[in-house]
Each structure stands twice: as C-alpha cells, then as structure tokens.
Image (cartoon, helix red, strand yellow):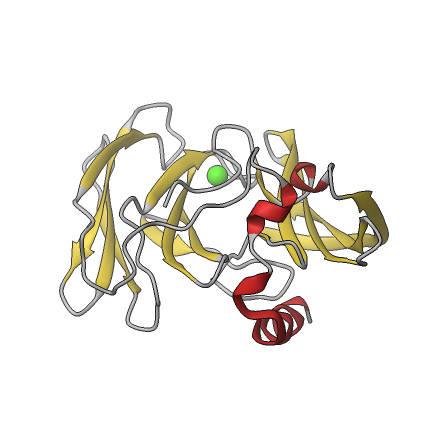
Amino acid sequence: MPRTRRISVAAACAIALTAPALGATAAPTEPATASTAHTATTTTHRVDVDGDGRLDTVTVGPASNHRLRVGARTARGATSALFIDQRDEVVVPDKPFHGAAEFDGVRGKELFVVYGWGAHTPSFKVITWRNGKLYATRDPSDGDTRWTPDGAWGYGMGYRVTGSGSKRTLTTTFAENNQRGSYVGRATRFTWSTRANEWVRTGSSKVRFSERAAMNHFGWHVRGIGVWPQG
Ligand SMILES: [Ca+2]
C-alpha cells in the first residue's frame, strides 16, 4: 500500500530527500513553527458547503486539547462542527485552511484543511457537508481520512480531479524516483458514484514522468485550490 511504502521510504531517507531537488517552482514548503503550540488564529470563510447556491460561513481554528475545530453555519441556519486531533503532529500549520473546491460529485464545496506536517508531507482532511453535518472524507486509494499529497525528491503523491457536476474522476498518483531522472509508479482512477455516494475504483495504470514534470502529478490538482499549502 502506498502509505506503508511512503513511511518506509521516509524512515530510510529521512530529511535528505526534501523538495528543493525538484526545483523552486511549486515544492511544498514547511512552516516555520516547529512545535505543537497552537499559533493558528481562527479564520472565517464564505463557502457554499451544502450546494444550495448560497454562501455559508466556515470557521477554522484551534480548540482545546490540541485539536483543530472546523465549523460551518449554512445560510439556512444549520450548524455542524468537526474536530481534528493534532496531538501526534510534529508541526502544526499556522494556516490550516487551504481552500475550498468542488471535489466530489455532490453539490457543495469540500473544505481542504491541513492539520500537520511530517518531514515534507502535509496531512489533510477533506471535509464535506452531507446530510446536515460535516464529515471527513476518505482517500479512496487507502481508505484513510488522512490525505497526503507529497512532493519529495524520493517519491510523491498527487490527486487530480477532472470532469464536472456529478461526472467526476479522481486520479491518485504515487511514484518513486528511479534515480535515473524519472519517476515511476502508478496512477489509480476513481469515478464518482452517485448511487454509492463515494469514489469507486475504475482502473489503474503504470506511469512514468520526468523530474521536470513531477509537479504536474504531485500535490493537489483541483480547480480552486493551490497545489501545495503555504504552511
Ligand atoms: Ca461536493
């Protein structure tokens, strides 16, 4: 599984394999705050989370017990909050709200919240409003609610969404540097199933691309949000 491999590679290569080898264009940058102290301030955002065409209010900020609180109040007055445990995070981002975008095949934008950093790996929750509540969605490539785009020299992970409305395809790409100028790995495709209300795996293929092209594959490639968080 990609996660197991990523962890083993990270353990073996430690901090030597950091992003600058890929060039200065879009590699993830680590935030300066290397502690679990809650330095983030609560921010408020206007996002249509329930898909009714009206802007709702989203707040993201620190809560007690090393948690991050993501709250939403819809235009029609429904409220929900979700808490993200940050106790095990080495580095806690100053700006946890990365953005909002139409991601899955259900109306309403998903919220992309970065809640921790490893050596170079940001951990995200992708949060959606469903049936009157906020939920942390699962990365279909491993079933985990932790989404981990990555762009180290040794390997990377990316998520790309294409299509529109309920007809959407999510491609997850995990590839490793073969140390001969290329990344080799696998792209797995998932199609949004309205009936199942989730991503359904529809195929995968081997991929190979140059170091120069790596950032076309790694990170977030979703209209409306940046490829990498700002820390
Ligand atoms: Ca949606």
Name the residue at the left extreme. 64
Q: Residue at x 56, y 55 (%)?
A: 18
Asked whether the viewer can see residue 200, the reply is yes
The x, y position of residue 48, in whole percent, is: 35, 30
Name the residue at the top extreme. 53
Q: Is residue 156 above or below residue 59?
A: below
The x, y position of residue 155, in whole percent, is: 67, 58
The x, y position of residue 228, in whole percent, is: 49, 41
Q: Is residue 209 above or below residue 154?
A: above
Q: Residue at x 18, y 58 (%)?
A: 38
Quadrant position of residue 68: bottom left
Q: Check the picture and name the quadrant holding the N terminus.
A: bottom right
* The one of 124 and 110 positioned closer to us in this rendering: 124
Q: Residue at x 50, y 57 (%)?
A: 120
Is 20 left, or right, of 141 in this rendering? left
The x, y position of residue 99, in whole percent, is: 39, 36
Is 162 left, or right, of 50 in this rendering? right
* The one of 13 and 59 positioned closer to us in this rendering: 13
* The one of 6 and 15 positioned closer to us in this rendering: 15
Quadrant position of residue 215: top right
Q: Is residue 43 above or below residue 91?
A: above
Q: Residue at x 63, y 38 (%)?
A: 161
